[in-house]
Amino acid sequence: MSYSQVTFSRVREYLMNANDSSPGTKTPMGAQPTVMMFQFPVAPRENYNEVYPGIIIGDKVCSKDKGQLKALGVTHVVNCCQGIKLNQVDSDAAYFRDAGIDFHGIKALDHSSYNMTPHFSAAAKFIEKALKSNGKIYVHCSMGISRSATVVLAFLLLKQNLGLMEAVKTIRAKREVFPNEGFIRQLCILESTLHTSL
């Protein structure tokens, strides 16, 4: 599928530039990248952040603490790294049943060749249903940077009609996220597909 290389470059540059500023600080339009291409993004300062009304992106630390999730008002969990391997979290619907938390699992790997696209629609529907029932969703991966951010961005494109750049700025204002380059490309393709189908 084709996608806008311009959009890809703008999103990636924005995320790289945002590393030098705290969440909420806007990068001047046309600003030159201040980070070398091989440098890793700044890690999130907190284990979790509410990045959109009712949607929390977080890491694995809080993801299995049912008491803390309940204290946060979480009614739904999306595990974007379900599994038993390194950088995965072994949780499922049965684990959360006694806490009354609904669960959606995605067995995704955080590398640029992994195809997240097949998971976008089901995850977006799960998040949308949770929000419509006045729920609160904890969307997580291992660090709450790449896989979880990708799923929330897809939701914002699919269900909130945001453009990719607007969605990225919305989330990045609240949490230091950085989807890998393969995921950014997949989101660019999703945006292109949505515009084509209008």
Image (cartoon, rainbow, N blue to C red):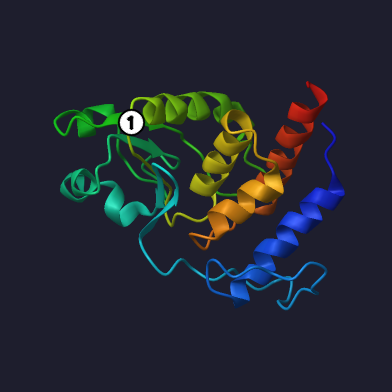
Instruction: Count neighbours of disc 1 (C-alpha within 10 A) and say few if under 14, some if 14 to 19, many if 20 or more.
Output: few
Q: In the displayed structure, does residue 22 sit left or right of residue 31?
A: left
Under mark 1, the amino acid is Asn
Residue 157, horizontal then vertical, whole percent: 63, 35
Residue 177 horizontal/vertical position (percent) = 54, 58
Which residue is pictured at 44% across the width and 31% down the height? 127
Q: Is residue 113 visible?
A: yes
With respect to residue 121, does 39 lie above or below? below
Relative height, residue 128 to residue 176 (above, below) = above
Position of residue 188 in the picture relative to residue 137 (left or right): right
Question: Residue drawn 57% across and 44% down?
Answer: 150
Which residue: 53% across, 73% down?
A: 22
Q: Nearer the viewer, residue 161 or 188?
A: 161
- Quadrant containing the C terminus is top right
Q: Which image quarter: residue 102?
A: top left
Question: Residue at coordinates 58% horizontally, 38% vertically from top-left?
Answer: 156
User: Between residues 33 and 28, which one lies in front from this camera angle?
Assistant: 28
Image location of residue 34, percent across then percent down: 73, 78
Q: Which residue is mark 1?
A: 134
What residue occupies the far top of the structure in this picture?
Answer: 197
